[in-house]
Amino acid sequence: MSDYKKLKVWEDAHKFTIDIYNITKKFPDDKI
């Protein structure tokens, strides 16, 4: 199962997750 990181779907999902994390960590703590 070492090829899972090569899958386009996995790459897109991983990038999306990182983007969301980077956006939400900028929010004030009381907004989460």
Image: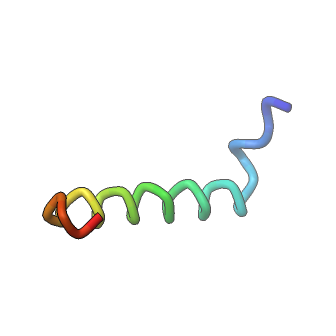
Image point (50%, 65%), residue name: 16
Give the farthest residue toward the top: 2
Image point (39%, 63%), residue name: 19
Number of numbered markers: 0
Quadrant hosting residue 1: top right
Instruction: Give the x, y percent position of residue 11.
Output: 62, 56
28 with respect to 15 (left or right): left
5 with respect to 25 (left or right): right
Instruction: Give the x, y percent position of residue 32.
Output: 29, 64
Give the farthest residue toward the left: 28
Q: Nearer the viewer, residue 30 or 17?
A: 30
Give the farthest residue toward the right: 1
Q: Nearer the viewer, residue 6 or 30?
A: 30
Q: How is the image coloured?
A: rainbow
Quadrant hosting residue 21: bottom left
Instruction: Give the x, y percent position of residue 27.
Output: 19, 66
Instruction: Give the x, y percent position of residue 3.
Output: 80, 37
Image point (42%, 55%), residue name: 18
Quadrant hosting residue 12: bottom right
Image point (56%, 54%), residue name: 14
7 with respect to 15 (left or right): right
Give the farthest residue toward the front: 30
Instruction: Judge whether 21 appears above or below 5 on screen.
Output: below
Instruction: Judge whether 6 appears above or below 22 on screen.
Output: above
